[in-house]
Amino acid sequence: MLTYSFSDIGSDSLYEYLYKCIKNDILAGVLSPGDRLPSKRSFAKHLNISTITIENAYAQLLAEGYIYSIPKKGYYAADIAAGPAPAPASPSQEPVPEQGEETYFADFTSSQTHPDTFPFSIWAKLMREVIGSRSPDLMKNPPSGGIFPLRQAIAGHLKEFRGMDVKPQQIIVGAGTEYLYGLLIQLLGHGKVYGVEDPGYQKISAIYKSNHVACRHIPMDKHGICIGKLEELGADIVHISPSHHFPTGIVTPISRRYELLGWAAASDARYIIEDDYDCEFRFMGKPIPSLQSIDVMEKVIYMNTFTKTLASTIRISYMVLPGRLAEQFRETMGFYSCTVSNFEQYTLARFLADGHFERHINRMRNFYHGQRDLLLGYLKNSPLSPHITIMEEDAGLHFLMCVDTSVPDGAVLQKAKSLGLRLTSLSQYYYEKGHAAKQETAGNGRENCPREEHSATEHIFIMNYSSIHPAHMEEAIARLCQAFGVR
């Protein structure tokens, strides 16, 4: 009869230990297929344990297929045709940890937020108050567009800051603009042709392509996206950033804005997606009015995010749909769940409604203004100064730097990387390289850049200063001089 010792069973219960012993004997061939197991009563007496322990062990083996039963005859070892593969040998060395993002001494491409600029104490206080006063609401599933207090607070902010008269029902809240783009594609239709700016933020076109929709890259002139090319390339939807284009910094003038609205009004199928990603950060004059605020034909879908203003890790974005599209969304896509937790939504609603957001924006505007001036000061006093022209420095969190150099962009970027600097050039943001070769970069001061036999966009670099630590700026510019071979 099978005999097992129960003197060292560890944390297992008796039945679990017995189950493992019998299973291992079946897998090892100690019990051959068809071998009869002892009866529960005799086995319990032999092992000096209870019958219920035997019964539970047999039940588990039976459920997993290691044994089978024949009524009134007993239990038998099953035929395990193929046992489990042998465990791989332990590696001779420690496994290599998963690679994270590369780290740089100074990253001129990152929009990551400084930890000491986030209002942690206020946010924590509001979250505690929300948990105390809103605990029943926190457990309710929010509407597909987000909780009403947050949409109401966003509508109030847009009225105050952007001059936009919108209803809370038009606002859809989601976890990041990428998610909202996916909703828009479903709402507007996969059969539409989507136009994006060239040059432009390449992730946008990648998202459209990943959603299997036709995407056209529309060239730009010094006033923004070219209307004639929109017509020529058959775009139905155009995705633009008219108040501060990335990466060129172009502000689309009012005349071109009305042209765009006229283009959209010419067909019921046409819409404009206005990406207002960094409208809060303008250092000279008043904020540029949104395109949505002058749209009387309900052709503009407005999008914005809190990742630029609060923190890059707060994935809360929103879009404002024209009235008829908002109604269509409720009817056809209202089954979607909002992808932002109630905890964050109610906290952000309080943050907006209590005036904390406005004060935070004012602080951040001053902070980034100081960041920009510090970087420009170090550039002005560096050996690079006689060789550069600065453009589009009055808005957003980046400016353009045109460099009088014969070194190809690619070589500069590689040298900068070897020196611990992450840098990008304007030429990298063109989808159609032919456009880059012909394009005159829009932006004040471009005509002062040295003209050589190279592309009109070559030797222009995007300088994002938002995440550069002030203590690193002087050394970063010294390394930048080395990358360009200037001493």
Image: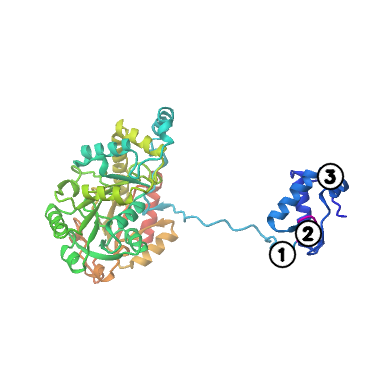
Q: Determine if residue 40 is in view.
A: yes
Residue 23 lies in quadrant: bottom right
Alpha carbon separation for disc pair 2 and 1: 17 Å
Q: Which of 480 and 465 is in front in this view?
A: 465
Residue 375 position, x and y percent, is 32, 48
Question: Could you tell me the amino acid type at mark 1?
Answer: Gly
Q: What is the quadrant of the N terminus in the image? A: bottom right
Figure check: 351 above or below 66? above
Residue 74: say if magenta.
yes
Q: Name the residue under label 3.
A: 7
Question: Could you tell me the amino acid type at mark 2?
Answer: Tyr
Part of the protein shown in magenta: 71-77
Residue 203 lies in quadrant: bottom left
Per the image, label 3 sits on a secondary structure element best described as loop
Q: Nearer the viewer, residue 479 or 358?
A: 358
Would you call the spot at circle 1 few (<14 residues within 10 Å), some (14-19), or many (20 or more)? few
Q: Name the residue under label 2.
A: 76
Q: Name the residue under label 1.
A: 83
Alpha carbon separation for disc pair 3 and 2: 26 Å
Per the image, label 2 sits on a secondary structure element best described as strand
Q: Determine if residue 391 is in view.
A: no
Alpha carbon separation for disc pair 3 and 1: 28 Å
Per the image, label 1 sits on a secondary structure element best described as loop
